[in-house]
Image: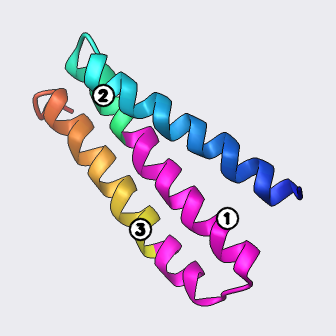
Amino acid sequence: MTGIDIAVVVVAVAIVLAVVRIVLGPTPADRAVAADLLSFGIIAEIALIGTRAGSIGTYDLVLVATLVAFLSAVSLARVMGRGRR
């Protein structure tokens, strides 16, 4: 078992815990943070599996997915803050 395999398992556990927090979260802020963790966990899984497979094409996918996840997290924070600066 290599370090990448261990990282895949650890990130998978984090994804499962994020889903549990989304389902059981007492506040919308908890659910938003868990959704952010879920999206970046999925991106990490894609990056790890792509690294293990030796596929260079997955890096483009990871870059675009990270940008989309970041922008969605920022916009969600803006909506939850009621649009104030």
**Nearer the viewer's eye, disc 2 or disc 3?**
2
Give SS at disc 2: helix
Residue 3 vertical placement versus 59 (above, below): above
Q: Position of residue 65 (x, y in %)?
A: 41, 68
Cα distance, mark 3 to mark 1?
A: 14 Å
N-term-proximal mark, 3 vs 1: 1
Q: In the picture, residue 52 is in which quadrant?
A: bottom right
**Mark 3, residue position:** 65
Name the residue at 45% across, 39% down: 37
Report the magenta stretch's main SS. Answer: helix
N-term-proximal mark, 1 vs 2: 2
Name the residue at 12% across, 35% down: 83
Label 3 close to label 1 by CB (< 8 Å): no
Question: What's the residue type where badge 2 is placed?
Answer: Ile
Q: Position of residue 10 (x, y in %)?
A: 68, 41
Q: Residues within 10 Å of mark 3 (few under 14, many from 20)?
A: some
Q: Position of residue 77 (x, y in %)?
A: 26, 35
Q: Nearer the viewer, residue 30 or 77?
A: 30
Name the residue at 47% across, 35% down: 16
Question: What's the residue type where badge 3 is placed?
Answer: Ala
Cα distance, mark 2 to mark 3?
A: 20 Å
**Mark 2, residue position:** 22
**Nearer the viewer's eye, disc 3 or disc 1?**
1
Residue 9 falls within the magenta-colored stretch: no
Q: Position of residue 6 (x, y in %)?
A: 79, 48
**Mark 1, residue position:** 48
Q: Residue furthest right?
A: 2
> Which residues, given as a range, are shown in magenta?
36-63
